[in-house]
Image (spheres, rainbow, N blue to C red):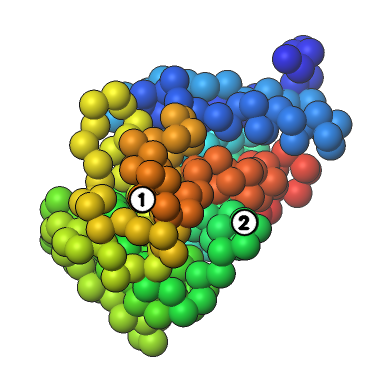
Amino acid sequence: MPDVTGHTRLYAILADPIHHVKTPQVMHALFARHGIDGVLVPMHVAPDGLAGAVAGLTEMRNFGGFIATVPHKSAMLELCDRIEGDGARIGAVNCVRRDPDGRMIGAMLDGIGFVEGVRRAGIAPEGQRVLLAGAGGAASAIAFALAEAGVASLTIVNRTVARAEALAERVRETYGAVRVEARAQSGDVAVYDLIVNATSLGLRPGDPLPIDAGGLHAGQTVAEAIMDPAETPLLAAAAQAGARVHPGLPMLECQIELMARHMGAFGGGEA
């Protein structure tokens, strides 16, 4: 643990539940490498307490900012004073800087982290047929990042199909060359090259699978946004079917410095 003093800059991660988060360990390693006097604290905040928690954090003058994760990414959009980058278009925020005047400045970095993570693993998203489970904050960021990366097609699956269609329409408006469709159920997954779970299913014991895993096969890549457990039931099913698996942690590792920079840990306050 870092040596916390009155000079230490405070940061946080807000989640519900909180037990699964890996961000403090990864961020503290980054702080140590760069000699940054900071500490990132996990904060268990339920949805009905989010606005109050954010209001309280604005009053803490030694507070630099926070990371928002499940289930707060979409709700944070309305609680920020300003959004940088494409967070407004995506419809979610996962990193917030507290400026010296107390204003909260949001950004969305999940999509950048996910695409960079798969690329570092040797998986090229260009030209791939993608099935994306989820239409929430992380899923929205990943959808936009995959479209920007040049996937051939993107099928968004969500139990509330209207939410999936709304996301699909936003992606189509920006990336007209990508075929985008929305569904309520995954159907036959055998036709996809890359399958991504960006829902919270798999986070808790007993969760159902986010897709029908019956068609998984060798030659596909199945990727997770969930970081703990490292092997979700979906990844276990994919490995058993011979598919390549890609865990959730690289998404965090590939955006952690961007998060620190956005929160001003390096002194500039810009992502």
Q: What element does badge 1 sit on?
A: loop
Task: Give the residue drawn at x 58%, y 32%.
Answer: 23
Three-letter residue code for mark 1: Ala
Q: Residue 25: horizontal and vertical position, in percent? A: 64, 26
Q: Nearer the viewer, residue 43 or 185?
A: 185
Task: Give the residue drawn at x 69%, y 46%.
Answer: 257
- Whether residues under marks 2 and 1 lie with C-beta atoms below 8 angstroms apart, the answer is no
Left or right? Give the position of 115 relative to 81.
right
Task: Return the residue at label 1.
Answer: 241
Q: Residues within 10 Å of mark 1 (few under 14, many from 20)?
A: some
Query: Which part of the image, by quadrant, shows the N terminus?
Result: top right
Q: Residue 242: horizontal and vertical position, in percent? A: 42, 52
Q: Residue 161: horizontal and vertical position, in percent? A: 14, 59
Q: What element does badge 2 sit on?
A: loop
Query: Which part of the image, by quadrant, shows the C terminus?
Result: bottom right
Answer yes or no: is residue 195 visible.
Answer: yes
Q: Can you tell which quarter of the image residue 8 is in?
A: top right
Q: Residue 151: horizontal and vertical position, in percent? A: 44, 75
Q: Mark 2 and mark 1: span between their CA atoms? A: 20 Å
Nearer mark to the viewer, of 2 and 1:
1
Q: Nearer the viewer, residue 99 or 244?
A: 244
Task: Return the residue at label 2.
Answer: 121
Task: Give the number of marks.
Answer: 2
Query: Eyeballing the image, is 123 above or below 138?
Result: below
Three-letter residue code for mark 2: Ala
Task: Give the residue drawn at x 49%, y 28%.
Answer: 21
Q: Residues within 10 Å of mark 2 (few under 14, many from 20)?
A: few
Q: Earlier in the sequence, mark 2 or mark 1?
A: 2
